[in-house]
Image (spheres, helix red, strand yellow):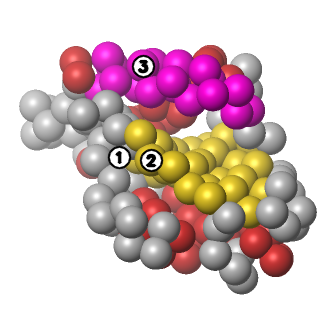
């Protein structure tokens, strides 16, 4: 089985106009939602082989909560910052892991979730978790066919 979990970073703080977009931290809601959503995913028993995250502070912080809950250290990837759907999927395929959790940004997350769910996921709000599984044992096959199943969870 091959699995991909997409996590849009938790809600960030726009109250720092002098900060570069890459350096925006999570706000109070984001700091509440990220550990809650990580705990919910962990409660399902799912443990990915790898966690890949954008280098942006809000994504790194979100990934840290998921890493804690799942017992894994996130791997930071510059190409995931603002990445389109194609780059997000390619990162999973190229990771060498059979199951991958990716923490990144919109619009790429919503586009990829929408494609993989055949339109069933219309929007990935902050800290949403979309999980896709394939019966195939490798990404080459999995990335060419529709997932066998998918699920969606959101803090709201």
Q: Mark 1 or mark 3, which has the lower sequence index?
A: 1
Q: Mark 3 or mark 2, which has the lower sequence index?
A: 3
* Residue under label 3: 36
Residue at image position (45%, 19%) is 35
The front one of 8 and 54 is 8
Q: Mark 2 or mark 1, which has the lower sequence index?
A: 1
Q: Name the quadrant containing residue 88.
A: bottom right
| Vertical comparison of 127 with 1: above or below | above
Q: Residue 100 location in percent, x, y?
A: 70, 49
| Residue 111 relative to residue 69: left or right | left
Q: Give the number of the mark in front: 2 or 1.
A: 2
| Vertical comparison of 2 with 52: above or below | below
| Residue 2 relative to residue 53: left or right | right
Q: Residue 124 location in percent, x, y?
A: 33, 53
| Residue 34 relative to residue 130: left or right | left
* Residue under label 1: 22
Q: State the quadrant of the C terminus.
A: top left
Is 88 part of what is drawn in magenta?
Answer: no
Disc 1 vs disc 3: Cβ atoms closer than 8 Å?
no
The front one of 65 and 133 is 133
Circle 3 Cα neighbour tier, 10 Å, few/some/many (<14 / 14–19 / ≥20):
some
Which span of residues is magenta-colored?
30-47
């Amino acid at each position: 089985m091959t699995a991909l979990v997409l996590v849009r970073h938790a809600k960030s703080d726009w109250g720092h106009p002098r900060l570069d977009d890459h350096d925006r931290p999570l706000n109070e809601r984001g700091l509440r939602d990220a550990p809650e959503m990580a705990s919910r995913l962990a409660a399902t028993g799912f443990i990915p082989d790898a966690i890949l995250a954008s280098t942006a502070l809000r994504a790194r912080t979100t990934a840290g909560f998921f890493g804690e809950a799942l017992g894994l250290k996130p791997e930071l990837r510059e190409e995931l910052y603002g990445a389109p759907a194609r780059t997000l999927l390619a990162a999973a395929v190229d990771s060498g892991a059979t199951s991958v959790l990716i923490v990144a940004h919109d619009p790429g997350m919503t586009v990829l979730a929408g494609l993989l769910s055949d339109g069933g996921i219309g929007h990935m709000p902050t800290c949403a978790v979309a999980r896709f599984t394939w019966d195939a044992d490798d990404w080459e096959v999995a990335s060419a066919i529709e997932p066998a199943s998918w699920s969606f969870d959101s803090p709201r």
